[in-house]
Image (cartoon, rainbow, N blue to C red):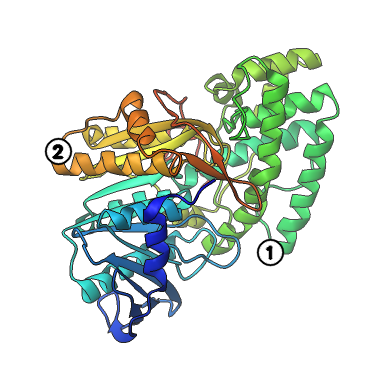
Amino acid sequence: MKAPAAWLRRLCAGSILGLGLALLPASASAEDATITCSGTTVVLCTGHTTEEESGLTANFKMEKPADWNGTLVLYSHGYAFGASPLRDVGDPVTGAWLLSQGYALAGSSYARSGWALQQAFEDQIAVLGVFNDTFGRPARTIAWGHSLGGMITAGLIQRNPHRFTAALPMCGVLAGGPGVWNQGLDSEFAFLTLQAPGAFKLANFTDRADAADNFGKALAVFGAAQADAKGRAHIALAAALADVPGWFDPTKPEPAATDYAARLANQQAWNFNPDLYFGFFGRQELEARAGGNVSWNTGVDYHAQLAHSTQRDEVMALYAAAGLNLDAELNKLNATPRIAADPEAVKYLSKYIAYNGDIDMPVLTLHTTGDGLVEVTDEPAYASVVASAGNSSLLRQTFVHRAGHCTFSPAETITAFRTLVHRIDTGQWSGTDASTMNAQAATLGASGNFIFVGDPVTLFPVAPSFITYTPGQFLRPFNARNHGNEGDSGD
């Protein structure tokens, strides 16, 4: 594939111009950061800020074009297991387009990796302070980010509404922390209880080695379960309780709704890459932060959970094929001793973060329909709490018909961004229908209509795939207004 247009070359050029260096004091106000800037066509600044309470440092990156239009776009990156990355944009093609249109970019690495919301909320606001001190206060600031960064984006505007003009959370964990970790626990609890009781544990890990040991055991049990009809039925039930889609590969079409064998194989692919990894290593990292187990399934009725799942028909078909009594197994789940959470750990996770719906600015969300890591059902969970706060008019949710987590093309990302800017400029939502957005994305041509796939990464051409779509309901709702509508935290 050819290099994507002149704006990509401009981004690269702006990053390497080195006409002089300047060492400037800066900070969240300015005293606790260092900054080095270079360039003319695009001024690139890097440096680090120091968190006031922890003393930890976070690297930052800022880019301002010479013809800056007065708008700053603050990017929040996603979850990192290793070193926290330093990014001010999700992909270089979108970044080049933004700079070519006069937008400034900024972002922080955060002082810690993992479930880094506590650090991200402080470090991202610190970057805004550095930008103000270096370039002047923007006329508008738009928050955006992918995955955990989408969650951070929604959290930033909830916690610091006066600092932002609008937000674009993409593939975000918008059901909030307690909800998503509870839903993951339900899935693993059902599989463990019915397939291999006592084979591994699901929570309360002592350290990373403990998580690694149980992760290995879980992989073995999930893998062996594929070999017979009973195990496949249990995999399907576990997937249904988290609404994991039956579509995994973004380069292939979605299997038919009744192609249960293909859909189950794709759900198992999500288990192995990356859901179980998060379920053990991600959970252990979060438990260490929170000081205990953050999830619970006390009070959950698994008959009701399955009844509301979008994957219910697949479960019923595979249970019938295996000759298993579904009602009896759901009764067994309901009779099995449950897992309780540590109340103080739940408080930590609720702080970082559960949503209250109090948005006072335009928010446009974007999600793929075939996302098996952050399921598309996170979107109605967020819409529900926004509606309960009376703010539905400020929210629009858009969907792309594609498998994968955050597998948007640059053209789809740019189209969503332009749609949000139009809402800021006019005060009206227009052009958010799928046909209009697809037509706009198509105008960017081959240089924008591709996705990044594989390792090593290659460019796979795609057509714009916005779709009119209504997700199923999120199965374990918990937000800062109602604290969930089922179960309890085991207090």
Q: Earlier in the sequence, mark 1 or mark 2?
A: 1
Q: Which residue is mark 2?
A: 427
Q: Is residue 456 left or right of residue 161?
A: right
Q: Is residue 486 or residue 355 the one in the foreground? A: 355
- The answer to whether residue 199 is visible is no
Tell me residue 473's x, y (percent). Answer: 46, 27
Q: Is residue 487 or residue 151 the one in the foreground? A: 151
Q: Within the image, what quadrant is residue 15 found in?
A: bottom left
Q: Is residue 21 or residue 210 the one in the foreground? A: 21
Please state which amino acid type lies under the numbered disc 2: Gly
Q: Residue at x 67, y 23 (%)?
A: 330
Q: Is residue 443 or residue 435 the one in the foreground? A: 443
User: What numbered label is drawn on residue 440?
Assistant: none
| Pointer 2 local density, CA inside 10 Å: few below 14, some 14–19, many at least 20 | few
Q: Is 370 drawn above or below residue 304 in the view shown?
A: below
Q: Which residue is mark 1?
A: 207
Please state which amino acid type lies under the numbered disc 1: Asp
Q: Secondary structure at mark 1?
A: loop
Tell me residue 344's x, y (percent). Answer: 48, 57
Q: Residue at x 47, y 48 (%)?
A: 147
Tell me residue 220's x, y (percent). Answer: 82, 43
| Pointer 1 local density, CA inside 10 Å: few below 14, some 14–19, many at least 20 | few
**Label 1 to label 2, Cα distance in Å?**
50 Å
Tell me residue 332's x, y (percent). Answer: 71, 26
Q: Within the image, what quadrant is residue 198 found in?
A: top right
Q: Residue at x 73, y 48 (%)?
A: 201
Circle 1/circle 2 CB separation < 8 Å? no
Q: Is residue 426 left or right of residue 184?
A: left
Q: Secondary structure at mark 2?
A: loop
